[in-house]
Image (cartoon, grey):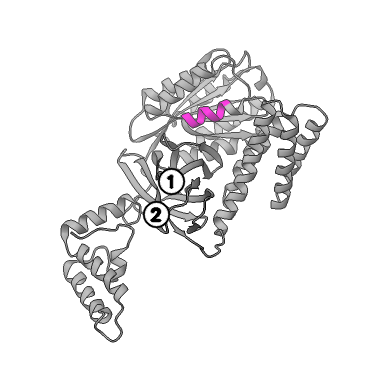
Amino acid sequence: MVAIDPTKDYYEVLSVSPLAGETDIKQAYRDLARRLHPDTSDGDPDRFRVVQEAYEVLRDVALRTAYDRQREMRGLSAQAPISIDMVLSRPAVPISTATQMLYVWLSLKATSELRPAQNRLNLALVIDRSNSMYGVRMQNVKMAVTDLVESLHPEDRLALIAFSDRAEVLAPSMPAQDRRAFGAAIAALRPGGGTEIFQGLRAGLDEVQRYANATSINHVILLTDGRTYGDEDAALTAARSATAQGLGISAFGIGEDWNDDFLDALARYGGGVTHYIDSVKDVRNVLRNQIQGLSGTLAHRLTLNLNLAPYARIQAIYRAAPYMEVLGHSSSKPVALGRLVSGEPIEVVLELLVEAQEVGERRIARIDIEAEEAGSLRPMQLHQDVRITFKQNPEQHQVPPKLLNIISRLSVFQLQEKAWRALEQGDTRQATQYLEAVATRLFDMGCRELGHAAMLEVGRLSQGSDPTGEGRKKLRYGTRALTIPSK
């Protein structure tokens, strides 16, 4: 029985189109076989074997169909909706008693097969109107919401909810073309009261759920400048439930007083994003960019499953683009990757530990990607093997520049995360050392503003003071953005 190897491009081997018919395939094989056969003066036995293998698969209708399907599922064919690019920190590891570290970079991006659907947006904007939103903050939010309404397609749906210690639906979900009703709702925004995020979140989810369907992008956008108390668990439970129903949640924090750990978790469970808005003047741009991203959604619910060989284990899984995030430290559960947006690949870095094996090539992991196409909910599956060669004395290998760049930026992100954890555990000295290292690396990268922010927090800790909320958020969300490819 002929074995199919979907990692090989048999069409390229025979120099034929994936649409080539039986006659073209047979003629291409004859020409190559005549030239490469071992019995000829210029024969090439190795290439001939590959040509023979390609022909045996492509001439058989059943085998060719199976081959094309496997290539498509792995993202390797021209017809695959999503492609997977992979780069290893090194192609070979030495036979040694020591555990070997291996980095694997994955880039998921849409191919020409996956085109933006004519999805309509079904949104709820949940706005914090507690006392702290008084004055300039509320004025800027009102202008930003007015701008958002005007940017929507007339057939998009929007609901406006305001919350403090209770929630009020200022405008129930309606088509965005009703500008007058939204204008009246925006004018009714008045600061006052405390902050209970769950109340507003629940009202927003209810409005989106009323008109949720498979052809819409169903999403809640939360805008807050404060901390909620006592209802975090209820909000996170609601986010998990919303994701199961196909609803997304993104959370934007204004200023320095909101709980970044909580909003990060809320957005992660809700399949959305978190954004730090350090100046209220930026609210308009942030909301506009969010709407553009939602409109460009190509696929929902991307998940990564990692199946490791017995001699490999995971150290950490990171998102590397469009922003940095720790995704997990275990291969036992699927890793949620969120949405795939047009023109914005998702990059993931796996940090693996590999035990030495016998000399030869081995598969150390199998990566399974699952997703649903936006608009149709058509399921998509891709597979990718991670293979490494074990050698007695492998030649020296330079880490590919792309991966080296990401690893260096990952290290900065990790250091600042370690600093905050050390501080939470009462180890101010260790936290200070971590932040000093962060500042040094940021200056080396040319990120002077972030470097100065780190040194300001170092100075505060050295004097026995607590870090500022602004400094923590600048460093956390600033180092996340370091992985965005420079243009």
- What is the distance, in whole Å, between disc 2 and disc 1 at their CAs? 10 Å
User: With 417 as the anchor, is 321 left or right in this view?
Assistant: left
Q: Quadrant of the N terminus?
A: bottom left
Residue at horizontal 21%, vertical 55%?
A: 65
Q: Main secondary structure of the magenta part?
A: helix
Indicate the position of residue 4 as horizontal and vertical percent values: 25, 58
Q: Which residue is situated farthest in the front direction here? A: 97
Q: Is residue 53 above or below residue 220?
A: below
Q: Quadrant of the C terminus?
A: bottom right
Q: Is residue 209 above or below residue 436?
A: above
Indicate the position of residue 247 as horizontal and vertical percent values: 41, 29
User: With 379 as the anchor, is 176 left or right in this view?
Assistant: right
Query: What range is drawn magenta here?
Result: 262-269
Give the structural element (helix, strand or loop) at label 1. loop
User: With 435 as the anchor, is 110 left or right in this view?
Assistant: left
Q: Do the numbered discs 2 and 1 sit on residues whose CB atoms are within 8 Å? A: yes
Depth check: 190 or 36 in front?
A: 36
Residue at horizontal 43%, vertical 53%?
A: 357
Indicate the position of residue 19 as horizontal and vertical percent values: 24, 63
Mark 1 sits on what residue? 311
Residue at horizontal 43%, vertical 54%?
A: 85
Indicate the position of residue 327 as horizontal and vertical percent values: 50, 37
Q: Residues within 10 Å of mark 1 (few under 14, many from 20)?
A: few
Mark 2 sits on what residue? 362
The amino acid type of the residue labelled 1 equals Tyr
Q: Residues within 10 Å of mark 2 (few under 14, many from 20)?
A: some
Depth check: 241 or 139 in front?
A: 241
User: With 383 as the anchor, is 69 left or right in this view?
Assistant: left
Give the structural element (helix, strand or loop) at label 2. strand
In terms of image quadrants, where is residue 224? top right
